[in-house]
Amino acid sequence: MTHVYDVHEISLQGAFAGNPYLDVTLHAVFSQGNRSVRVTGFHDGGDSYRLRFMPDTTGEWTWRTVSSLAALDGHTGRFTALPAREGVHGPVRVSHRFHFAHADGTPYLPFGTTCYVWTHQPLALQEETLATLAGAGFNKLRMAIFPKDYPFNTNEPLMPVFTPRADGTLDFDRPNPEAFRHFETQIARLAEMGIEADVILFHPYDRWGYATMSEAQNRAYVAHVAARLSAYRNVWWSLANEYDFMLNTIPMESWDGYCHLIEEHDPVRHLMSIHNGDPRMNYDHRKPWISHVCIQNWDVKRMPEWRQAYGKPVVDDEPEYEGNIWPAWGNITAEELVHRFWLALTRGGYAGHGETYADPQDIIWWAKGGKLKGEAWKRIAFLRRLLEESGVTGLEPLSGLVDGWPWTRVSGVADLGGRLRFLYFGEHQPLEWTTGLPTDDGRYAVDLIDTWNMTIEPAEQVPPLVQHPTRHGDAVRGGVADAAFGVRLPGRPHLALRIRRLD
Amino acid sequence: MTHVYDVHEISLQGAFAGNPYLDVTLHAVFSQGNRSVRVTGFHDGGDSYRLRFMPDTTGEWTWRTVSSLAALDGHTGRFTALPAREGVHGPVRVSHRFHFAHADGTPYLPFGTTCYVWTHQPLALQEETLATLAGAGFNKLRMAIFPKDYPFNTNEPLMPVFTPRADGTLDFDRPNPEAFRHFETQIARLAEMGIEADVILFHPYDRWGYATMSEAQNRAYVAHVAARLSAYRNVWWSLANEYDFMLNTIPMESWDGYCHLIEEHDPVRHLMSIHNGDPRMNYDHRKPWISHVCIQNWDVKRMPEWRQAYGKPVVDDEPEYEGNIWPAWGNITAEELVHRFWLALTRGGYAGHGETYADPQDIIWWAKGGKLKGEAWKRIAFLRRLLEESGVTGLEPLSGLVDGWPWTRVSGVADLGGRLRFLYFGEHQPLEWTTGLPTDDGRYAVDLIDTWNMTIEPAEQVPPLVQHPTRHGDAVRGGVADAAFGVRLPGRPHLALRIRRLD
């Protein structure tokens, strides 16, 4: 018996004289009535092979294996899928074009952070990372399969991802099952914490050879990863961190091919995207196999442009990190990062967190995890709680707010449900406000939100401001819309309004 | 006798039965050796006509009038032009493509503010405005010829700019000489204070009819203004405030035509530009009669894009105003406006100031002048003083800083003189820094500047950061350049560095 959205695993044994990673094919077909799902198996060291299946419907499932190795071929079995456990909502899907929801329909608003190589750190530090995550309020974690060689990241990984030869170099035709099993364990633990694992397959920051494997080695690795991980409900595929810095070894056609390989070996069809380094080098996220836009860009006010360019959910996973290290991508203030989160959300997208405070032992959250030292994460958790408790399903930009899209000075969104909107003033500090407030005569509760001090208090409703009546040039826009009421504000920055319809 | 760059005025008298504004032509030719300068005269009420000439070279000048009215035709005269008075440097010109200098070569870095209709306010308030300007540190003022009808601007002007008929409507074929003489007086007073007058000819915010004059009336007005004002050395022509909000009454061809009319009647060839409302509606500043780019745009980090698009000096005259009024263009914090000034300057352009704090009597600096209430102006004056005392002639973006133009995270410029550079960290707060510092072995004085607290103190030089030596992907850029030294920083935002070569 396996619960829906949990992993149903089948273990098989079979001796093979050659390289089973490269030369043994294995899959199973899982069936329920007329429905059948093809699941790729994988070699897990020695004579061991595994197949992992994530049931998404309850009831009886049967399965049958197909393999090039006789010992693995023709096995059959059956199991019962029970209803999902309490709190388990299934993989995250795109919902309402620009947003996300779990497979069971539960809205999912990504509030991610980044610990690129936390699974390669000493085990005690990994436990500390998990303990921090348990209390931090993030529900997505960007994490790489390969270790990282980079400033502040000079230590050897816990385990190599491929098997070392006698001379210490890695044999990229022989994965290290122990390393993968550890990685899977940590993904499963994140799943139990309600945290999506945004799994990064490639990155350029390398001294071991992972970034310079051959095309054939890359493809075998991608297929292996897809076979291993796709049954974990919380996996997102991030083909690369900063793919554009690897184009000399992995050309664009290869990236596209790896996406197709994942599609082939991932019956769950997890979310898939690919992260850029240079802001001018966004991947062409219009490609149909890309589920959502993952970008690195500090200029979060451009969110509406990306929405329009790609027509998919936009997650700016790297709007720069809070911290004080020397690289310029890792030293903005907590205030600025919180501001960028609010801007991203109130312009119809999502943002990601990272923290890069210098540390005497180079234990920096962004790469290794550990403890959070900054101030932004608390305000991001507050924002997530605010939106979830408000019942947000997806925030769509209010068109025509102030200067008209995409040049909006003050940001505003309405929830898909139509009964809720948020305005964010950011660096603006008006004493009163009308534009973007509801235009009908319904009753509304309006709350003033201090995004930094994390307070929510009722806002004072006042008569709406009225556009000055005489001629300002017929083409003048940007005045006050025909709102039913206005709000008095305290004249300080980083405030927001929540407007909830009561009747 | 008249000093170079002062106004040499000639008065003539002549009776005319019809409308002298429309139907009398008058010009004079001023000559010095083989050089001759054509100067357009203008009717100044009653039987009075004037010609104004700004000599730009010393020595003897002779002149002779030409007019359709016999009483004004064929007059001659001569005068001696003396060297410019102490502190008078002549009109501002474009210098080194992206920068400005006075006619005598003195560098001019624009630090402007905005009091759109200060000359239409009660005289006591105008005196207060001038007193404020005397101590504020601005050297340019945006000001409109026509009064303004707009929120916070509902009072009648001191004088109508055209002559009222018996029914109170204005006769746009009859200027009010008294109104123009007052406007000129105030321009001349600004000149004596070293403040350039950025004169706005049209704007859409009107209830008297100025925004809906006929094409013929507009053209007569433009020519008249050029004849009246071009001899004032501190005039800049700003064809409009927010021209794009008037396109229903003044189409694009007309704007171009007005520019040509000014060229025809302005022998000094003052700077000329035109200001947009919608950030997507920048005028095509590539047109050759446009001397510099005047724009309204809050996104000052895009400065390098505008430099590239137009190839001229860029002045973002309206990067939003410090204040707390309800329109979203008028309520950013002082901190944000100071930040935007530094960003504009350290990305190779210039910015403009405005202040819009709500006032019980609607006396708001941006439109009416009076007193400054905010905090940004002091920091802007500090910035101006810092650059002028440092000997800046023009600040050009440091190419390749951090992520490469135009995506620079940290801003940096080098002075045209080559011995001076500035870096601005803004929302970034690194503990140490190397990128963009000099790469040679010269001796340098490095100062840490707190842009908000207005302090300048020596910065601690440290060994340069060195790029981590192993592979990060061959295409990775954005590391530390090959600088000769680094600087230790205190890890807080809104800091800048000044780096001066000593030998």
Image: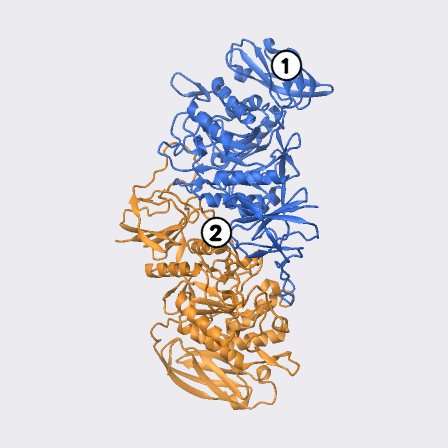
Chain colours: A orange, B blue
- Where residue B235 appears, as percent x and y from the top left, is 57, 28
Query: Could you tell me if residue B62 is visible in this image?
Result: yes
Q: Which residue is mark 2?
A: A301
Where B9 sits versus B407, above or below? above
Dot 2 amino acid type: Lys
Looking at the picture, tell me which residue is in the foreground, A473 or A187: A187
Residue A110 lies in what quarter of the image? bottom left
- As helix, strand or loop, the secondary structure at mark 1 comes to strand
Residue farthest along the right direction in this orientation: B34
- Host chain of mark 2: A
Query: Where does the image place residue B439, in percent across and percent down from the top left?
Result: 68, 53
Q: Quadrant of residue B237?
A: top right
Image position of B314 (left or right of B416) = left
Q: Is residue A63 above or below residue A399?
A: below
Query: How far apart are labels 2 and 1 at the CA level?
Result: 58 Å
Nearer to me, B460 or A292: B460
Q: Could you say whether the residue bearing mark 2 is in a helix, strand or loop?
A: helix
- Indicate left or right for B306 with A462 as reference: right
In the rendered image, residues at marks 2 and 1 fall on the same chain? no
Number of callouts in the render? 2
Camera-nearest residue between B422 and B188: B422
Residue, disc 1? B66
Q: Amino acid under label 1?
A: Val
**Which residue is rendered at x = 61% and y = 87% of the image?**
A18
* Residue A383, position as x, y percentages in the image: 39, 58
Image quadrant where one finds the N terminus of chain B? top right
For disc 1, the neighbor class at 10 Å (few under 14, some 14 to 19, many from 20) is some
